[in-house]
């Protein structure tokens, strides 16, 4: 996105102060939702596992493998995405002359893929595996996070699209095919 293209987005938000504040508020707090909810998922899964253990169910061992998958898939995906973005080291949109983001940032490079999008997407897939209704809500939250990262000017559309696609893809492979 060029500085001129982004200026139109920013001018539109500046002309609507309430919308601008809503975008800033959501950009600040919405990314916390997947990260706060993920430990909740792990607690719920462990409570279910302990219940299986108490009744001596043979399914307890299989369920323990599912819990391990719920830990390893997001962890490996996050590590892979972080390593990839460090290797590629693409500049952020606001590093262009004349590009003024809605959110002041000093970070240089490491824009592609968006780690917010990647992490939210893989956590959404993890929820989807165990609790589909919550997983669908997390997918919607992931898409909103992607849109917000572009609206505030800290990522480009390819950054968030690739990050989300990588998170959804690796999450699906890890949670269903492995």
Image: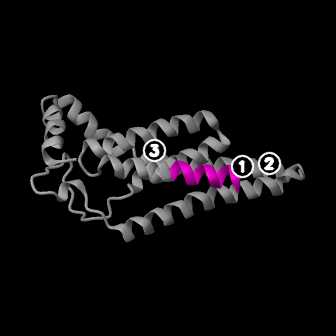
Residues at circles 3 and 1 in contact by the CB criterion of under 8 Å: no
Give 37 or 138, whichever is nearer the viewer. Answer: 138
Q: Residue at x 27, y 34 (%)?
A: 22
**Nearer to the camera, 38 or 165:** 165
Tell me residue 114's x, y (percent): 38, 55
Estimate how packed mark 3 is, as few (under 14), some (14 to 19) or many (20 or more) residues with alpha carbons within 10 Å: few
Residue 148, label in figure: none
Q: Identify the residue at horizontal 53%, vertical 60% (top origin).
A: 77
Q: Residue at x 82, y 54 (%)?
A: 60
Estimate the x, y position of residue 52 in percent, counting from the top left. 82, 49
Give how far apart the Cα atoms at labels 2 and 1 are: 6 Å
Q: Quadrant of the C terminus?
A: bottom right
Decide which of 11, 20 is in the foreground and name it.
Answer: 11
Task: State which quadrant residue 96 falls in.
Answer: bottom left
Q: Coloring scheme of the render?
A: one colour
- Asked if labels 1 and 2 touch by Cβ distance under 8 angstroms, the answer is yes
Using residue 17 as the reference point, say whether residue 70 is left or right of it. right
For label 2, the residue is 51
User: Regarding mark 3 in the picture, which secondary structure is present there?
Assistant: helix
Main secondary structure along the magenta-highlighted residues: helix
């Amino acid at each position: 996105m060029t500085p001129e293209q982004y200026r139109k987005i920013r001018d539109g938000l500046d002309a609507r102060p309430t919308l601008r504040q809503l975008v800033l508020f959501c950009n600040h707090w919405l990314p916390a939702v997947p990260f706060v909810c993920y430990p909740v998922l792990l607690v719920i899964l462990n409570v279910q596992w302990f219940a299986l253990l108490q009744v001596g169910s043979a399914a307890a061992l299989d369920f323990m493998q599912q819990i391990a998958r719920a830990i390893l898939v997001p962890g490996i995906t996050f590590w892979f995405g972080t390593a990839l973005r460090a290797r590629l080291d693409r500049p952020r949109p606001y590093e262009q002359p004349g590009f003024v983001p809605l959110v002041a940032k000093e970070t240089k490079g490491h824009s592609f893929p968006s780690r917010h999008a990647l992490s939210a997407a893989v956590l959404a897939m993890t929820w989807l595996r165990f609790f589909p209704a919550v997983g669908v809500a997390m997918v919607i939250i992931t898409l909103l996070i992607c849109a917000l990262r572009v609206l505030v000017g800290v990522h480009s559309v390819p950054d968030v699209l690739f990050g989300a696609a990588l998170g959804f893809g690796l999450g699906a492979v890890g949670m269903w095919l492995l």
